[in-house]
Amino acid sequence: MGDAVLVEAVLLGARPLDPDDVVAVARDDVPVALAPEAEQAIEASSRVIEALAGDDTPHYGVSTGFGALATKHIPVDRRVALQHSLIRSHAAGSGPSVEREVVRALMLLRLATLATGRTGVRLTTAQAYVGMLNAGITPIVHEYGSLGCSGDLAPLAHCALALTGEGEVVDALGNRRPAAEALDDAGLTPIALREKEGLALINGTDGMLGQLLLAAADLRRLLRTADLSAAMSVEALLGTDAVFAADLQALRPHPGQAASASNLRAVLTSSGVMASHRDPHACTRVQDAYSLRCAPQVHGAARDTLTHASAVASRELASAVDNPVVTVDGRVESNGNFHGAPVGYVLDFLAIAVADVASMAERRTDRMLDVSRSHGLPPFLSHDAGVDSGYMIAQYTQAAVVSELKRLAAPASVDSIPSSAMQEDHVSMGWSAARKLRRSIDGLTRVIAIELLTAARALDLRAPLTPAPATGAVIAELRESAPPPGPDRYLAPEIEAAVQLVATGAALRAAESVTGAFA
């Protein structure tokens, strides 16, 4: 074993979180800590709430009910009970548990807002979140329950419930158990909520934002891998790389398009297959189909969409989302910053781009299997056509995923359903947009994997022509787990092996070992 790597904690409060910070804490269990300036800001706003706690004048979240009950005045001796009642009643999720990384991301993002000092919680409450994250204790959060307005109330309430020692969690060893037991074993003390704290723990867009950041990290890798698989398909189908020339791409100066075309050119460099049909007298085709020729335009548009979504995410990371908030000058003010529309829109926008990139990949795959369009490849890339079906049904699987992705591209954010006796009469559905985007990311991974698998087999069948060095490196990586062409065999494991190469970035790394880092 090598030397242990010292992992520094992600520091909250000194600056807005970076997207990579969120991914590191959510997926890699990097520890977190509060910056000294965050602790000072938290204590300052906490004193503001303390000063209001005994006031007979109604203050929302401190001495009133919530939502449609905001006009209900709560006596001083019932205000602590009010906060616990809020959390218990709002922890009303249903359905399967969401992924551990999603829960960790939303916990981190809620803690980041607490660290701004704009929520009025006590330092001990923020430190309790630090302790739970660092102990690897993950509250059970359910699939259904958030409308994405007033933030992700139910998901965050399940996390807050665990802070108080109630509800269920999964501990660091993966065991599902009562929160009180897990906290005790980790040496953590459940918190007793004070005025305003229950509201501060649940009023945020953290669930949808966390899923946006995780999806963006995955999609950056997948769009580069889509460039790789598209290049392999162009090569396997005896297409031309001339259309990817930098001067042609510059005529339409979208940055994503330029980056995608650059990657396609890099992968196809020094391809023996491409060289075999560059002679205009030997190749009579005027131009390739759109799914080959227009790959940079579609992949590039998806990249630019991701750039926009990432800009929205960065602004959200610099936000303090709560209601009411403690302002810098000490006022406690209601606001509407908890509405999830900015995040919900880009989550939906990304699902549209994902569906289109996948749809184009499926069309390239289908061309390699169709003897009338594959330029000399055997039907369905089969070993003995008729006896063998080759990759016929792999394309069915790909097509089924693409069809599902088109359904998932229908935006959630155009929907709204009123709640809380019409107090919350317009909601963002951002959580729903986030959940379907996660499914879309998984689908795109599988579609790209099947294209990559198909293109590799097609290129093997082009022998003795040799693929580009980058392509060859990818095929060699794939052949570690998926054998070369031959008679029909159990195909599902080979598809899953390709899925893992795409999901882990191994296919991309293999190409980049030749080309250098993709754009």
Image (tube, grey):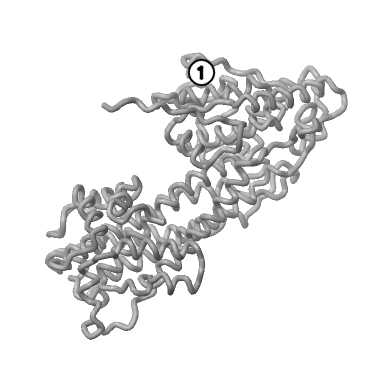
Task: Name the residue nearer the viewer: 257 or 94.
Answer: 257
Could you say where residue 348 lies in the image, as x and y percent from the top left?
A: 55, 55
Under tag 1, what secondary structure? Answer: helix
**Can residue 12 be seen?**
yes
Question: Residue at coordinates 49% horizontally, 50% vertically from top-left?
Answer: 436
Check the image and report above or below for 393 versus 151. Answer: below
In which quadrant is the C terminus drawn?
A: bottom left
Above or below, 94 against 42 in this view is below
Q: Quadrant of residue 317?
A: top right
Q: Nearer the viewer, residue 232 or 192?
A: 232
Q: Where does the image place residue 405, in percent across and percent down from the top left?
A: 44, 58
Left or right: 175, with 334 as reference point: left
Q: Residue at x 13, y 64 (%)?
A: 383
Say whether residue 335 is left or right of residue 346: right
Residue 148 placed where, x, y %? 62, 45
Counting every numbered tag in the picture gives 1
Residue at the extreme right of the image, as rendered: 57
Which residue is more in the foreground, 246 or 159? 246
Residue 359 is left or right of residue 335, and the answer is: left
Q: Quadrant of residue 487?
A: bottom left
- Residue at the location (54% across, 58% down)? 349
Of the 4 image quadrants, the one containing the N terminus is top left
Residue 386 in sight: no
315 up-or-down from 358: above or below: above
Looking at the picture, which amino acid does disc 1 mark?
A: Leu
In the rendered image, residue 513, in percent from the top left (x then y), is placed at 28, 51
Q: 216 or 429: which is nearer to us?
A: 216
Q: Residue at x 72, y 27 (%)?
A: 120
Residue count near mark 1 (Cα–Cα under 10 Å), binned few <14, some 14–19, many ≥20: many
For label 1, the residue is 183
